Image (cartoon, helix red, strand yellow):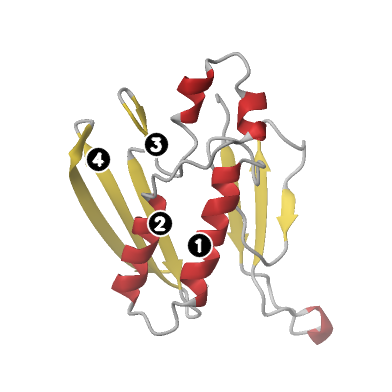
Amino acid sequence: FLSFNYLKAEKPSYSRAIPCLSSPSNVIYYYGNKGDPEPLFLNSGVYGLSNSLLDTPWKKLQYGKQLFSDVIKHSQNLQKEDLVQELIKLLNNQDPQLPDPAMEDQGKDYVLPFLNKYAALCVRCPGYGTRANTVILVDGEGHVTFTERTMLNADITQWKTSTYQFQLQI
């Protein structure tokens, strides 16, 4: 891939002198060094990032966005810890999303059975694959819960989960 994706969230400045310019919503931008030359403003919605650019039309990415939307739709009664666990579970989904013409086209120089191993949200292959899952929750008061589940020593049976909480300076 040899690329990177960058997301930037900003809380807009409020103008006391010109109230009509005030906006209560956050502003989010996306930039990928293999895509558009300028950062993209993201409207409200669900977006997907995998080992490619924003919203690459892979079936696994579309599937992940749908699973995410389903979790969020049913999250009103979940405690924060339960929501984090549901999202970690989603990120570890190994159901292959085949056939995927977009993935096959992008990987046309690879052998098809090799490519098919990468058609799930969570990839488990020797020497390559999902090594960490990260869930970042930000509430309306700017409280952040950052949870990361990391594989230890490339052993799929050993994981360490770390959670950090902090307050955004708004």
The image shows residue 144 at horizontal and vertical percentages of: 40, 68
The image shows residue 47 at horizontal and vertical percentages of: 62, 55
Residue drawn at (43%, 46%) of the image: 95
How far is the residue under mark 3 from the one under mark 1?
18 Å
**Which residue occupies the extreme left position in the image?**
158
- The image quadrant of residue 58 is top right
Q: Which residue is mark 4?
A: 151
Query: Which class describes the residues within 10 Å of circle 4: few (<14), some (14-19), or many (20+)?
Result: some
Residue drawn at (79%, 86%) of the image: 19
Pointer 3 or 1: first along the chain? 1
Q: Nearer the viewer, residue 70 or 155?
A: 70
Say which of marks 3 and 4 sits in front. Answer: 3
Q: Nearer the viewer, residue 170 or 153?
A: 153
Which of the numbered marks, if any, corresponds to residue 68? 1
Q: Which residue is mark 2?
A: 90
Which of the numbered marks, if any, corresponds to residue 123? 3
Amino acid type shown at disc 2: Leu
Q: Are marks 1 and 2 in contact (CB under 8 Å)?
A: yes
How far is the residue under mark 3 from the one under mark 4?
13 Å
Amino acid type shown at disc 3: Val
The image shows residue 166 at horizontal and vertical percentages of: 35, 67
The image shows residue 153 at horizontal and vertical percentages of: 19, 31
